């Protein structure tokens, strides 16, 4: 690595550093109807280094999933993270008011803004109630889980014995509450219960267990009984007009801005106005609204009847905390972590809140086996009462359903796959050799496959492989190449790793393939081989940038004698979003399934649960799926860690590429992948280290490198150089860097919503997706962009909501799945806490020809590479996959 200046680089003392933090951090508006924020809720100089809950507000910078707290490290939630992060899911721009950069759970537990801790909850206006039987069941199950967590009893006993109903908590009837009756709360809680692994019977249970979390037997001091006297009456309900106008009236009555009307109507449905009047905390369901703002809104509507112990508030917070956990990458949270989060949000009785959420079906409860090193898995059908420790997880139904859908879909692909049959050949046929594999592609009649004519001409099949489904009514007759045909294709593969991947795909309906950038040629070789055998094969990538790189590999992999031209083979490269939407790829058949036989998904680590579930459900029985990716890069922006869980579960055949990334950048990144940050020889200045003392100098050096040094020394223009930094906020975050780069490269007044023609931008059409582009103009329809050669119009509402950012500088999560000729990675001193090995690996591997590292974190960089591999996520997919394997083994064991 070189620390020399590139040609033409100017010392910082001779040029002013643009883009200071004071000039780039937007002002925050006050929460609607809320009182002055507590000191811990106020913005700090490092306010942009926020926690996952802040990601809900586009005006704040959420910690990315890789920077979130590890629930396995204690009773923490994503909100406990204090490291600077990035916002992969929400755009920049002021949408909601009052977005304070406080930590949701790591803060102390004062009453939320706009809610007095001592206000009794007995006077709350009509709170929803739970039936006595459901409450009794919830209490009984709560006691069960408390006993499991404390180790007093084995979990198996609660599945064998009938639960003992606990005494339902006293709850005044609605009439009594409306008339001012007051029910004092219990004594103080002892604090959040630490996670304790309880035992569980070895045999598997049918479906997830759904006991609620433990009953602490008391309440928080914030919920102490109110002094004797009549409770304050609720304010009269707001009379609302129909439609969106009624939503505006309710918002105005609660002191919330009218700009939330349309998002509220979209989130809450046609009865949004009535719903907000009856339960003001449903405002938390609107993207960008924080608990402090919802508390202020409820206080303005309900008056003194509003209190921290209001059941409606507790239920809204349960859902909101789990939503924020999903933003941080978790598909579920441990019970102790969620209890602690509710306690720190001033909920007087978090156990009762969780019991009610479980009884209402808003939250699901699961048991997740805890893997112990050196402990063998219990054999299927084992009669021994060997107990295995478990943890209790709570999650929202849609993420639970997505994980179960992915697990079921992957198992379906394995179970419905028809193995390649070895055809019986006479010696004369064997003497002819596999030849070109054409004859071997004919399916055996005994297997019920198509006739010889349907497979004898794979070239004609390849010509129509990219045609959308539904062009004619002729049902597709699957082609089943023989083992000899597959072996011939593997023998012609460009590398041993590509040959191994082709053989694995020939014999399994699901394959996992791992490798770095150079290994992307191997899935391309598989796609080309499969199409030459007559299969409808496609490759899907996370980004358009990745699709173009895959198309180039496919063109290189095209056989010299292929009947289909290189252009036709290049159409096999699509994006995941384009494939699912039908804008790219083969389309769908008459049953709604994707009209393909083999799908290779590159950038598999970027698949979130819900996208993966939709993708797997779209594959027909018997189709082949290959998930390929680099396990060292950052995980998806959405919840889950599908690729990592699939590898850890060893659910399917795995092929590890032996193709290394060459050059100094490849050597550097390969070392990072194993936890070593070493110097590499870079005679052509492929890797340059630029030390800086502070954030201001980091911004100055970055602008200098992009605008002058890299173009002059290496010939890479500024528009082909990408800046990558840790987060959006801070003195050297994307905001500050983009402002400085715009001033130097494309100065202008920003007359189109802050943008000018020629500005580089990053457009987020959906959470977790980043599309680079360039502004070409604007009109009444919106902002016009050129995104990788495709004209795109972003509506004015989305521009105002922050769906478009300036894009000279991106975060590592935004840059995942893309590569540029040159990259400049900026590591200011305040970014040290947000660094992990996965972050460094992802950022450093985005450059094809050149990498400059603006280094201001000193020894924090090698320490992060060596000691902080990744911030863990709480998911259930690995357990579900392992249970699927065990269930498949049980019949054979019984036989």
Image (cartoon, rainbow, N blue to C red):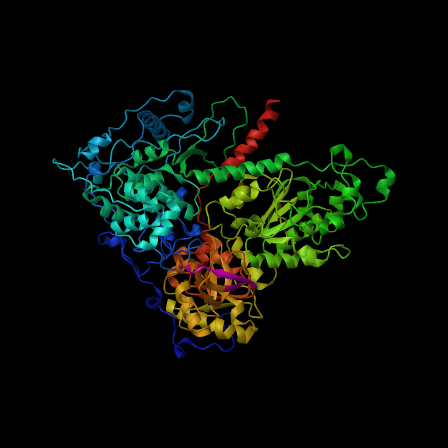
Q: Which residues are magenta?
A: 785-796
Q: Quadrant of residue 717?
A: bottom right
The magenta stretch spans residue 875: no
Q: Residue furthest top?
A: 161
Question: Can you say which quadrant of the picture contains the C terminus?
Answer: top right
Q: What residue appears at the point 40 percent right and 67 percent down from the top-left corner? A: 754
Q: What residue appears at the point 26 percent right and 48 percent down from the top-left corner? A: 297
User: In front here: 466 or 24?
Assistant: 466
Give x and y (percent) for residue 715: 57, 73
Question: Does 480 appear above or below 256?
Answer: above
User: In front here: 708 or 474?
Assistant: 474
Question: Does 55 appear above or below 736?
Answer: above
Question: Does 211 appear above or below 746?
Answer: above
Magenta segment, principal secondary structure?
Answer: strand
Give x and y (percent) for residue 585: 62, 51
The magenta stretch spans residue 788: yes
Q: Quadrant of residue 123?
A: top left
User: In front here: 686 or 125?
Assistant: 125
Classify residue 33 as left or right of residue 196: left
Whether residue 290 can be seen here:
no
């Amino acid at each position: 690595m070189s620390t020399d200046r590139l040609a033409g680089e100017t010392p910082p003392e001779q040029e002013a550093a643009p883009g200071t933090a004071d000039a780039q951090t937007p002002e925050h508006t006050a929460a609607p109807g809320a009182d002055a924020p507590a000191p811990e809720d106020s913005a700090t100089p490092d306010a942009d280094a926020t926690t996952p809950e802040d990601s809900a507000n586009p005006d704040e910078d959420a910690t990315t999933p890789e920077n979130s707290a590890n629930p396995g490290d204690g009773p923490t939630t994503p909100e406990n993270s204090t490291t600077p992060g990035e916002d992969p899911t929400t755009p920049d721009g002021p949408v909601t008011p009052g977005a304070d950069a406080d930590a949701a759970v790591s803060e102390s537990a004062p009453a939320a803004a706009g809610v007095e801790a001592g206000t009794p909850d007995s006077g709350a206006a009509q709170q929803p109630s739970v039936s006595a039987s459901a409450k009794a069941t919830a209490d009984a199950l709560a006691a069960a889980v408390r006993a499991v967590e404390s180790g007093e009893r084995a979990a198996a006993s609660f599945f064998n014995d009938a639960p003992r109903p606990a005494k339902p908590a006293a709850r005044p009837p609605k009439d009594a509450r409306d008339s001012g009756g007051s029910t004092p709360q219990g004594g103080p809680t002892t604090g959040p219960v630490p996670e304790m692994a309880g035992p569980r019977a070895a045999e598997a249970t049918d479906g997830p267990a759904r006991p609620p979390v433990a009953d602490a037997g008391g309440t928080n001091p914030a919920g102490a009984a109110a002094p004797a006297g009549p409770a304050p009456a609720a304010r009269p309900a707001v009379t609302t007009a129909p439609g969106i106008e009624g939503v505006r009236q309710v918002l105005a009555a609660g002191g919330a801005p009218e700009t939330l009307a349309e998002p509220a109507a979209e989130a809450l449905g046609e009865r949004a106005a009535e719903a907000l009047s009856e339960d003001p905390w449903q405002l938390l369901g609107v993207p960008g609204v924080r608990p402090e703002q919802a508390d202020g809104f409820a206080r303005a509507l309900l008056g003194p009847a509003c209190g921290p112990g209001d059941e409606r508030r507790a239920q809204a917070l349960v859902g909101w905390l789990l939503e924020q956990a999903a933003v941080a990458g978790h598909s579920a949270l441990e019970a102790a972590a969620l209890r602690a989060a509710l306690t720190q949000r001033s909920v007087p009785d978090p156990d009762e809140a969780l019991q009610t959420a479980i009884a209402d079906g808003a939250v699901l409860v699961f048991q997740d086996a805890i893997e112990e090193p050196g402990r063998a898995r219990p054999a299927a059908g084992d009669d021994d009462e060997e107990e295995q420790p478990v943890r209790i997880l709570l999650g929202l139904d849609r993420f639970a359903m997505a994980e179960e859908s992915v697990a079921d879909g992957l198992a379906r692909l394995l179970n419905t796959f028809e193995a390649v049959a070895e055809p019986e050949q006479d010696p004369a046929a064997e003497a002819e050799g596999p030849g070109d594999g054409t004859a071997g592609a004919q399916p055996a009649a005994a297997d019920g496959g198509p006739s010889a004519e349907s497979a004898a001409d794979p070239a004609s099949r390849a010509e129509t492989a990219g045609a959308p489904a539904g062009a004619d009514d002729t049902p597709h007759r699957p082609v089943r190449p023989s083992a000899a045909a597959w072996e011939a294709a593997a023998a012609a593969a460009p590398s041993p790793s590509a040959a191994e991947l082709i053989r694995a795909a020939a014999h399994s309906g699901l394959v996992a393939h791992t490798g770095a950038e150079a290994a992307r040629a191997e899935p391309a070789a598989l796609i080309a081989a499969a199409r030459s055998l007559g299969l409808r094969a496609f490759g899907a990538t996370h980004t358009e940038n990745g699709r173009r790189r895959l198309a180039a590999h496919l063109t290189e992999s095209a056989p010299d004698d292929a009947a289909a031209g290189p252009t036709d083979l290049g159409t096999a490269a699509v994006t995941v979003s384009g494939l699912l939407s039908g804008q790219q790829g083969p389309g769908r058949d008459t049953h709604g399934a994707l009209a393909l036989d083999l799908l290779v998904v590159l950038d598999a680590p970027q698949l979130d649960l819900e996208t993966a579930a939709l993708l797997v459900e779209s594959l027909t029985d018997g189709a082949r799926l290959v998930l390929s990716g680099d396990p060292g890069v950052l995980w998806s922006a959405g919840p889950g860690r599908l690729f990592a869980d699939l590898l850890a579960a060893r659910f399917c055949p795995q092929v590890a590429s032996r193709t290394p990334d060459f050059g100094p950048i490849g050597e550097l990144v390969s070392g990072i992948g194993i936890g070593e940050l070493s110097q590499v020889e870079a005679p052509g200045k492929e890797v340059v280290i630029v030390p800086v003392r502070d954030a201001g100098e980091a911004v100055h050096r970055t602008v200098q490198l992009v605008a002058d040094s890299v173009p002059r020394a290496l010939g890479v223009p500024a528009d082909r150089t990408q800046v990558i930094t840790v987060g959006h906020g801070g003195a050297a975050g994307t905001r500050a860097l983009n402002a400085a780069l715009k001033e130097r490269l494309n100065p202008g007044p920003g007359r189109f919503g802050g943008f000018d023609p020629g500005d580089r931008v990053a457009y987020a059409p959906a959470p977790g997706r980043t599309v680079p582009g360039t502004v070409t103009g604007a009109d009444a329809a919106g902002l016009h962009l050129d995104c990788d050669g495709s004209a795109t119009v972003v509506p004015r509402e989305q521009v105002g909501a922050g769906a478009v950012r300036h894009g000279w500088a991106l975060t590592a999560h935004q840059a995942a799945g893309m590569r540029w000729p040159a990259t400049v990675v900026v590591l200011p001193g305040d970014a040290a806490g947000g660094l992990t090995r996965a972050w460094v690996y992802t950022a450093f591997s985005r450059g094809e020809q050149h990498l400059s590292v603006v280094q201001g974190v000193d020894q924090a960089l090698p320490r992060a590479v060596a000691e902080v591999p990744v911030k863990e996520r709480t998911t259930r997919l690995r357990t579900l996959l392992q249970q699927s394997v065990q269930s498949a083994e049980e019949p054979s064991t019984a036989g």
